[in-house]
Amino acid sequence: GAGVSQSPRYKVAKRGQDVALRCDPISGHVSLFWYQQALGQGPEFLTYFQNEAQLDKSGLPSDRFFAERPEGSVSTLKIQRTQQEDSAVYLCASSPTGQDEQFFGPGTRLTVL
Amino acid sequence: RKEVEQDPGPFNVPEGATVAFNCTYSNSASQSFFWYRQDCRKEPKLLMSVYSSGNEDGRFTAQLNRASQYISLLIRDSKLSDSATYLCVGGRGKLQFGAGTQVVVTP
């Protein structure tokens, strides 16, 4: 079956520009997670949804980061006024219940110039 | 201090040899543990879950030691295709990832 998909795969933004990253989880998966991965590091948790409810957003680095999952399926991570330090790979993962293994999408590689 | 700590390596392993490495976790409330494999510029892929009783999947064996708060992964009969970064993961709902252990299998 189809896995987690993310778009765009690559995004180049000028500093100060707003970006929106999309995640399509595996159909039927209740939980959806966003991570940020810098080069040479493991994924760092950003935020977590169970259906449409955002249960934990403790990992969002600033109020420029905003995520939503309005219908409990597709999710969007928005970054306003991008900064160079936002450059990273943004990974989305989904999980059947949230207490078990997570399945990752291919990521969006964001480069802020 | 990160919640999950791993030796970054690299572990250089001759083809056919056995390699083992650990990671430690600091959150004693963690309930779920996994090993993920990540190839260069790719997403992490689940290698195996880690159970308290230990578990084996082919050439891979994972162990969990709750008393000492560490998780181990052993790879037997290493293949060239095992070259990757292995991410140790633990948590309770929200998973914490280690920075990864790089394994390089050489001919």
Image (cartoon, coloured by chain):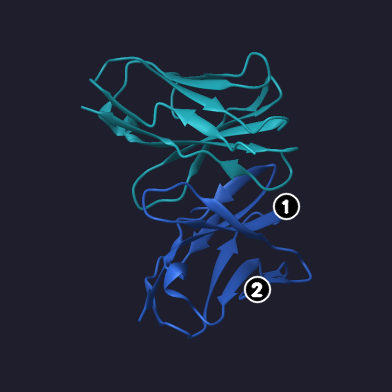
Chain colours: A cyan, B blue
Q: Which mark is residue B29?
A: 1
Q: Can residue A59 be seen in this view?
A: no
Secondary structure under tag 2 reads loop
Q: In which quarter of the image is the N terminus of chain A?
A: top right
Secondary structure under tag 1 reads loop
Amino acid identity at mark 2 = Gly
Identify whether A31 is placed above or below B97.
Answer: above
Expressed as whole percent of the image width and height from the top left, the position of residue B47 reads 60, 59
Expressed as whole percent of the image width and height from the top left, the position of residue B107 reads 35, 81
Mark 1 / mark 2, whichever is N-terminal? 1
The furthest residue to the right: B53
Q: Which mark is residue B75?
A: none
Residue bearing mark 2: B58
The residue that appears at 60% across and 71% down in the rendered structure is B72
Amino acid identity at mark 1 = Ala
Q: Can residue B28 be seen in this view?
A: yes
* Nearer to the camera, A49 or B38: B38
Query: Could you tell me how far apart the alpha carbons at marks 1 and 2 are, in whole angstroms?
Result: 29 Å
**Chain letter, disc 1 residue:** B
Q: In which quarter of the image is the C terminus of chain A?
A: top left
The residue that appears at 64% across and 33% down in the rendered structure is A26
The furthest residue to the front: A1
* Nearer to the camera, A73 or A46: A73
The residue that appears at 73% across and 30% down in the rendered structure is A28
Crowd tier of the residue under label 1, counting other residues whose Cα lies within 10 Å: few below 14, some 14–19, many 20 or above: few
